[in-house]
Structures are given as C-alpha cells and as structure tokens.
Image (cartoon, rainbow, N blue to C red):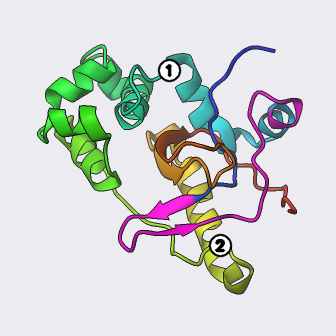
Amino acid sequence: MNSQPRFGVSHFASTNSCTESTVQMDTPNIPLESAEGQALLASCEAADRAAYDALWPHFTRQRGLTMCGLSSLSMVLRSLPHTAALADWSEEEVLARQRCSADVLLRCGATLRQLEAVARSVGLRAERSHVPPDAGTSSDAGSAGAVEAALAAAVRRAPRGVRVLCNYNMSLAGQPPYGGHFSPIGAFHAVRELQP
C-alpha cells in the first residue's frame, strides 16, 4: 500500500480556541493508510473527494515540529491553479511572505487566527470558524450535524478552489501524545455513520 497523508474523512476532534474548551467526537480514528481508510476514501462520491485528488500530488511532510500549519497552507497553495504558478510555495516561502512574527511561528507554531492571517498575507481569501464546544456529544447531536453539514459543504466546493484546513487536538483524535495540529481535509464520507 502506498504511503498517504492522514487527511481526515468525516470525523475529527477540535479545539475551540475562543473558549479553550475541547470537543471529543464519539467516533474511532481510522487511519487513511489502513484498508478501512482506503475503502472509505474509494467509496466517497467524486465531489466529496475532489479536495483530496487536488491536494495529494502536492503532499509533503512538515519540516519542523511547529510547521504543520505552514505545511498545510503550502500544500493548499500548490494545489490551486491560480496560485501554484506564483511561487514554489514551500513552508519557507510561505513563512517569508507572511506578516506576523516568523520567530513565534517557528518556536510555537500557529494558532488558527495566525494561520488565517498568513493565508490572507499570501493573497488567499480565508475564513476562520470554530466547532461549538459541545458539538459531537450525545447531548448536542444537532450541533454535530450542523458541523458535519458545514464541513461537507466546504469540502464539496473544492472544484471551485475551496480548501479546508482543520486545527485539532491529535490526542483527542486518537493520536497521542501529540497536541494541536493543522491538516487539510481531503475528503468527506457522507454515507457512513461510525459507532463507538
């Protein structure tokens, strides 16, 4: 099996940086490189995996422990026809063109707000949104459905140049001992509801 990035499908955990609360989804982590992950990706509708198809040829591993946001953003820039020809869009190129403190990004990584600012500084339209603190819990199935619907709608706009980056807590998503992380969302599997 070829080595592929761990882009999420439809389940994720998120940190809401407005309130510093965390949300843990009640679904298992399914690595994309597993047989089940590959089967889920293959069974996605074309519109639900168009972002993956655009992003995968541009995948590179992040070069430093704090570079996941810049690495994700560089993949996005290389995947968009209108920006790909402007530069090589390595992590270093994105870092050189941004307007916030490079030292802070290199030392601590980016917050969602900072990554939004970096995206805008390289000419992208960027919109930041947060998962409600109680989304994904059994007490708030409505919010979880709204989050999934918004995520699916954004992923399905990939043919029109929309890309989605997710800022999540890796430990809550089943990848301990790591903390905050950025990753592009490459696909959304709409038909399967995963049970704990």
Secondary structure state at the residue bearing disc 2? helix
Q: CA distance from mark 1 to mark 2?
A: 30 Å
Q: Is residue 157 above or below residue 38?
A: below
Please identify the quadrant where the C terminus is shown. bottom right
The stretch drawn in magenta includes residue 196: no
At label 1, counting other C-alpha atoms closer than 10 Å, the crowd grade (few under 14, some 14-19, many 20 or more) is: few
Asked if residue 17 can be seen in this view, the reply is yes
Q: Quadrant of the N terminus?
A: top right
Residue 22 colored in magenta in the image: yes
**Which of the 4 image quadrants contains residue 186?**
top right
Check disc 1 and give the amino acid type.
Answer: Arg
Q: Residue at x 37, y 30 (%)?
A: 67
- For image coordinates 60% across by 58% down, the residue present is 13
Position in image of residue 141 (x %, y %): 71, 80
Which of these two is toward me, 171 or 131?
A: 171
Task: Please name the residue that numbered disc 2 is placed on.
Answer: 144
How many numbered callouts?
2
Give how far across and how far down residue 179 sits, in percent.
Answer: 50, 47
Q: What label does residue 6 carry, if any?
A: none
Residue 68, above or below 191: above
Amino acid type assigned to the residue bearing label 2 in the image:
Ala
Which residue is farthest front? Answer: 177
Q: Which residue is mark 1?
A: 61
Residue placed at 30% from the left, 45% from the top? 115
Is residue 7 toward the left or the right of residue 116 in the image? right
Write down the region rendered in magenta.
14-37
